[in-house]
Amino acid sequence: MKIGVTGIGSWPGSDVAATQRRLLGELGEAPDMPHLPELPARGLGSDMIGRALALIGEFGFELQPTGWRVTDAPGMDHRRARARWREDLDLAEEAAQGYAGAYKLAVTGPWTLAALVERPRGDRMLADHGARRDLAGALAEGIAGAVAEIHRRLPDLELVLQIDEPLLPRVQAGRIKTASGFSRFRSIDVPELSETFTGLLTTAQAAYAGTLPTALHCCAPGLDPGFVYRAGFDAVSVPAEFLDHAALDALGPSIEAGRALWLGIAPTHVQDQRLRPDTLAERTLGLLRPLELGAHWADRLLLTPACGLAGWTQRPAVQLLRSLREATEIVAGELTR
């Protein structure tokens, strides 16, 4: 049994071409999975929110002191984000020529965007059912366009889509504050949350000539893995520290049924501090052994950093990926005993 490694999305530095070559070099052999890097250090529009908005063509956006806001036409910062997205694609295409393995695109999801982006006359799009529905639909079309474009440029890739939703548990629980800070938006019902994801995944899949595996990543506490699978995702990506006994027990049937777990076993909250491979392996086995799934983990388990690495420096970030890869060899051997 082999277990793979993948990064989460963000990465240190500002050189897209060099970063893409590095990730392909470190994670370019199955079952590992390189990804299109997100480099916030490049400046405005290169962070997770700017990149997602760059994919949306149905709305214009501009950056205000309070954050991104919907406008009638794209503002300067939105145009810059779109230009950087096109540049990222050009550089990724050049770097990935000849690569034919799994390759991941990570995009911020509709609920995190709705909780952060303002309507034209203020307050978040989360406040209005029609606004958040329209934003989700526009994002779904934007992601579908990106999926189709990557497939056209690099048809030999096995594309994987990751949706990043760090604010999803807070949206679901009604813990997002309004602009005034004195009240909170109401919680969103599970059917609306689920239907939004299902629509996004269906639209993205229709744009891809083949099967498009999907995962939802959330680096915040309170995520229900069962909800993620029921919404249609093939994998859930979550920091190990947020998997309590109830969540772990609920994972078992889903893994046996063919779903996957991307386990964020390497802490990232302390910059440039990585754990030894044997420590990472021990932590992984301590979580997964009690489930007694053995060979069921084959092709259904990836080890990852807990969150993005934008705050790190290059060398420790690369060393973290290497430590994870060494840990997978230990874990694979132990889980099949």
Image: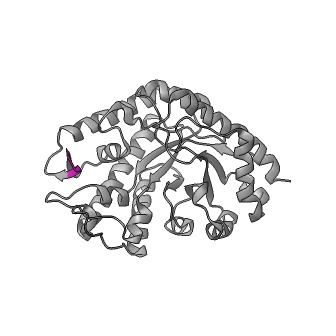
- At horizontal 36% and vertical 72% (from top left) the residue drawn is 188
Magenta segment, prevailing SS (helix, strand or loop): strand
Q: How many marks?
A: 0
Left or right for 99, reference 107: right
Left or right for 120, reference 242: left
Give the colour scheme shown.
one colour
**Residue 198 visible in image:** no
**Residue 40 visible in image:** yes
Is residue 267 shown above or below 236?
A: above
Is residue 308 shown above or below 131?
A: above
Closer-to-camera residue (76/287): 287
| Residue 22: x %, y % from top left | 54, 27
In the picture, residue 259 is in which quadrant? bottom right
Q: Which residues are magenta?
A: 62-69
Left or right for 17, reference 52: right
| Residue 138: x %, y % from top left | 29, 56
- At horizontal 66% and vertical 52% (from top left) the residue drawn is 301
- At horizontal 51% and vertical 43% (from top left) the residue drawn is 104
In the picture, residue 190 is in which quadrant? bottom left
Residue situated furthest right in the rendering = 337
Is residue 18 shown above or below 178?
A: above
- At horizontal 51% and vertical 61% (from top left) the residue drawn is 221
| Residue 126: x %, y % from top left | 28, 64
Question: Would residue 304 be counted in the magenta stretch?
Answer: no
Left or right for 298, reference 119: right
Closer-to-camera residue (267/144): 267
Is residue 157 shown above or below 53?
A: above
| Residue 36: x %, y % from top left | 47, 37
